[in-house]
Amino acid sequence: MGEAPTANQVAVAVRDDLRAVMRNFATGVCVVTTFSGTAGLRTHNALTINSLTSVSLDPPLISLSIRRESTFLADLMDARVWAVSILDAEGEDLARIFSRPEQERKKALGSLPAKPGERTGALLLDSSAWLECRYWNHLVAGDHLLIVGEVVALGTNLPRAPLVFLRGECHRIDLDRTG
Ligand SMILES: Cc1cc2nc3c(=O)[nH]c(=O)nc-3n(C[C@H](O)[C@H](O)[C@H](O)COP(=O)(O)O)c2cc1C
C-alpha cells in the first residue's frame, strides 16, 4: 500500500488542479495604473491583470486581486487611488508589456499614449473602457490581496473588438463574425 500524501503534496496537487481548472474560465484583460510620489513629482506604475470583477452597483464597487509581494501593490495601497483600462483586441502588446518587471513597465509608461484620469491622476491607456477608483476595503486572501475599490469615474470608447484571456493566452474576438 502506498504512503499517504503529505499535507504539502496535497496543497501542491490542489494548486496545480486549480490552475488547470481556472485556465478554462475566460476573462477580459486590463491594465491597472497607480503612482507613487506627490502631485508635482509622480512616478506612474502599471500592471496587467485579469482579476477585475464587478462587485456592487450601489455603491459602485469593483475588486482586483493582486499578488501580495508585488511592488505595484505597495504603490496602489499608498496612493489609495487607481485606474483600470479594459484592453481591446489591439491591446495584446500592452498586456505583454505590463506583465514585465517593474522597471520595464515604468519605462514603457513614459513612451505610450496615456492621460491622467481627472478624478485620480492615475493614467488611462487607449482602451475599450475605463474606470477610476478609490480604495474602499481589502481582504488578505492567501498570497494575494483582494482590493475593493469605489468607482469615482468611468467611460467607454467606441465599440471595439474585445481581448479575452483563456487557456493561458490572449485571444481577439471578432464580434462581427461571431454575431
Ligand atoms: C493576462 C495576465 C493577467 C494577469 N493577472 C494578474 C492579476 O490579476 N493579479 C496579479 O497579481 N498579477 C497578474 N498578472 C501578473 C502581473 O501582470 C505581473 O506579471 C506580476 O505581478 C509582476 O509584478 P511585480 O513586478 O509588481 O511583482 C497577470 C499577467 C497576465 C499576462
Image: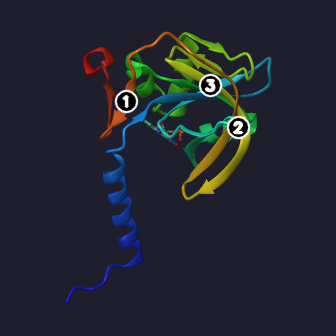
Q: How is the image coloured?
A: rainbow
Q: What separation in Å lies between label 2 and label 1 (alpha carbons)? A: 27 Å
Residue at 74% over, 33% down = 79
Residue 168, position as x, y percentages in the image: 32, 39
Local SS, label 1: strand
Callout 2 amino acid: Asp
Name the disc covering residue 152, or none.
none
Q: Is residue 121 left or right of residue 178?
A: right
Instruction: Report the label total.
Output: 3
Q: Which residue is mark 1?
A: 164
Q: Which residue is mark 3?
A: 131
Residue at 45% over, 13% down = 159
Local SS, label 2: loop
Callout 3 amino acid: Leu
Residue situated in front as seen by the camera: 98 or 164: 164
Q: What separation in Å lies between label 2 and label 3 (alpha carbons)? A: 16 Å
Q: From the image, which quarter does the C terminus lie in?
A: top left
Local SS, label 3: strand
Residue 53, position as x, y percentages in the image: 54, 39
Q: Which residue is mark 2?
A: 58
Q: What separation in Å lies between label 1 and label 3 (alpha carbons)? A: 18 Å
In this rendering, the answer to whether 89 lies above or below 13 is above
Q: From the image, which quarter does the N terminus lie in?
A: bottom left
Q: Residues within 10 Å of mark 1 (few under 14, many from 20)?
A: many
